[in-house]
């Protein structure tokens, strides 16, 4: 089931996200995030009129996706950046695609024009998901992140709604 996320989902979301924070270079955060911080992020996203969605399986949150402002300047108001994380135990079950479909549908209804996804590279799974959904690569930045004692590239994919 895909539904709108709420601050009450923060502990589950923090658990999912912190796996990636502490064990991967997929996110550039380096310290675990508290449920309170996640709840604050959910409130910030939804207060901006943007969607935050969660996937539930058997009453448990197993993934989430949201959109945030691409930039603060007014002319960017129809462009957003997407974020998606799936619980490590539920990978490759179609949850990411379901979440993205729901997120993109909500963004279309909200009159967004462009969605941009940033991907720490290499990440074949995320690249394949974005391209399967119609995103195309538009940028590649070399060695812009540093985590786990190594430099990391970031690519950007976008889709016009």
Image (tube, rainbow, N blue to C red):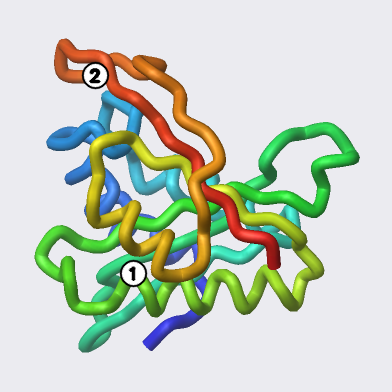
The answer to which of marks 1 and 2 sits earlier in the sequence is: 1
The answer to which of 75 and 127 lies nearer the viewer is 127
**Can you tell which mark lies on residue 84?**
none
Count of picture labels: 2
SS label for mark 1? helix
Identify the residue at horizontal 35%, vertical 15% (top origin): 143
Q: Quadrant of the C terminus?
A: bottom right
Q: Is residue 112 visible?
A: yes
> In the rendered view, does 92 fall on the left or right side of 138?
left
Q: Position of residue 113 (x, y in %)?
A: 76, 60
How far apart, in angstroms, are the residues tagged by discs 1 and 2?
24 Å
The local crowd at label 1, few if under 14, some if 14 to 19, many if 20 or more residues have their Cα within 10 Å, is many
SS label for mark 2? strand
Q: Which quadrant holds residue 149?
A: top left
Q: Is residue 44 visible?
A: no
Identify the residue at horizontal 55%, vertical 70% (top origin): 103
Identify the residue at horizontal 30%, vertical 75% (top origin): 95
Pointer 2 residue:
147
Pointer 1 residue:
96
> In the rendered view, does 143 fall on the left or right side of 141?
left
**Figure check: 50 above or below 81:** below
The answer to which of 115 and 133 lies nearer the viewer is 133
Identify the residue at horizontal 42%, vertical 73% (top origin): 99
The local crowd at label 2, few if under 14, some if 14 to 19, many if 20 or more residues have their Cα within 10 Å, is some
The answer to which of 81 and 159 lies nearer the viewer is 159
Query: Going by the picture, which residue comes out furthest to the top?
Result: 149
Q: Position of residue 150 (x, y in %)?
A: 19, 14
Q: Which quadrant holds residue 62?
A: bottom left
**Figure check: 141 above or below 158:** above
Query: Going by the picture, which residue comes out furthest to the right?
Result: 74
Q: Which quadrant holds residue 92?
A: bottom left
**Figure check: 129 above or below 43:** below
């Amino acid at each position: 089931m895909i539904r709108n996320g709420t601050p009450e989902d923060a502990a589950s979301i923090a658990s999912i996200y912190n796996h990636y924070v502490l064990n991967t270079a997929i996110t550039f955060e380096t310290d675990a995030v508290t449920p309170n911080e996640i709840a604050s992020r959910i409130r910030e996203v939804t207060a901006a009129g943007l969607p935050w969605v969660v996937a539930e399986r058997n009453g448990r949150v197993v993934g989430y996706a949201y959109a945030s402002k691409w930039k603060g300047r007014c002319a960017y108001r129809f462009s957003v950046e997407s974020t998606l994380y799936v619980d490590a135990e539920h990978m490759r079950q179609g949850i990411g695609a379901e979440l993205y479909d729901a997120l993109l549908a909500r963004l279309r209804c909200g009159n967004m024009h462009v969605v941009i996804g940033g991907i720490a590279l290499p990440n074949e799974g995320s690249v394949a998901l974005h391209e399967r959904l119609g995103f195309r690569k538009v940028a590649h930045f070399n060695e812009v992140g540093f985590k786990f004692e190594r430099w990391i590239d970031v690519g950007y994919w976008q889709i016009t709604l």
